[in-house]
Image (spheres, rainbow, N blue to C red):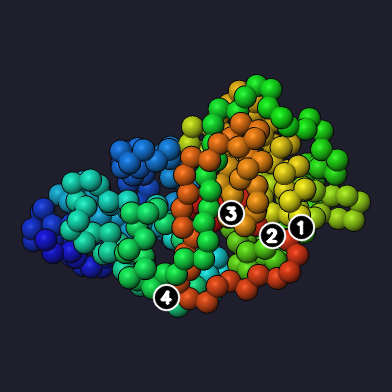
Amino acid sequence: MPLLDVHASAPTDAKAPRLTALRANHLPYAAALSLALAWPYREADWRFAFELGSGIAAEVDGRLVGTALWWPYGETHASLGMVIVAAEMQGRGLGRALMGALLNEAGDRTLILNSTQEGLRLYTQLGFVPVGQVFQHQAVLPADPLLATKAIGIRPMQAGDDEAVRRLDLTATGMDRTPLLDALFKAGPVIVADHGTGVQGYACVREFGRGIVIGPVIAHNAADATALIATLASRHRGGFVRVDVTEDSGLSPWLTSIGLPRVGHVESMVRGACPSVAAGARLFALSNQSLG
């Protein structure tokens, strides 16, 4: 079945997939595509991601059958994600076509993504290299979890903290994620770790999927990272909580112990030189698996 370029005119075969720019009016159908794969994205989650980046849609006879999005982080980096192909279209090269269109748009940037096991073969063929894993932890948090009710040195983000938070994020990720941070600051509460010498860590929380997601979480040490997560999680006892932590964070056993079991993992992959990460603050938890 032929695949048309994203800039091509209307196909002569109405049943042939046509690639075009993802539009706002695609989002309700994109949410249905992800739901069919048991991905928990709401339409609001799609809109949050869509407004931060851009994407490619695949249509057959006017019906959405595939998506792929990317988010630029400065001029040198980007994240890719939300690559979905409808079940009836799988095995026909549509995923490769969607990725090809994204790679063409992203140009020479270093690209990061988090891959399911199903996507590993394709991404490896496209030049992505595994660099670690991300562990997905989630559950309805018990009403009386083993969480500290008041963590020392943890406070709400205040006016004037934003630049320190941006510096921490750049140190930990090696990428300029200013648009993502601006959106997260508006989406929900942000707290910081401050032991009297300035901001040493931060964590965000927002509505996502079946409840809330905690992330990003960036800190200089695991003690502050756990305190940040515990503070936000304790506000959502009895609700659905999700945290996606990096393999090297060391937080996976602790999350399980407080009632957030590990339910899966993805492979973190990079195409190009790995982002240059400075010593100091570390990324403990992602904002979500697509955005990083």
Amino acid carrying mark 1 in the image: His
- Determine contact: label 1, label 4, CB under 8 Å: no
> Residue 201: where, in percent of width, then height?
76, 53
- Which badge, 1 or 4, comes first in the chain's sequence? 4
Q: Around disc 2, counting alpha carbons within 10 Å, would you say few (fewer than 14), some (14 to 19), or many (20 or more)?
A: many
Which mark is nearer the camera, 3 or 4? 3
For marks 1 and 4, give the CA distance: 33 Å
Which mark is nearer the camera, 1 or 4? 1
Q: Around disc 1, counting alpha carbons within 10 Å, would you say few (fewer than 14), some (14 to 19), or many (20 or more)?
A: some
- Determine contact: label 1, label 2, CB under 8 Å: yes
For marks 1 and 2, give the CA distance: 6 Å
Residue at label 4? 107
Amino acid carrying mark 2 in the image: Arg
Q: Quadrant of residue 236?
A: top right
Residue 125 seen from this side = yes
Residue at label 3? 246
> Residue 127: where, in percent of width, then height?
38, 73
Residue at label 2? 282
> Residue 224: where, in percent of width, then height?
77, 48
- Which badge, 4 or 2, comes first in the chain's sequence? 4
Tag 4 secondary structure: loop
Residue at label 1? 220
Residue 72 seen from this side = no
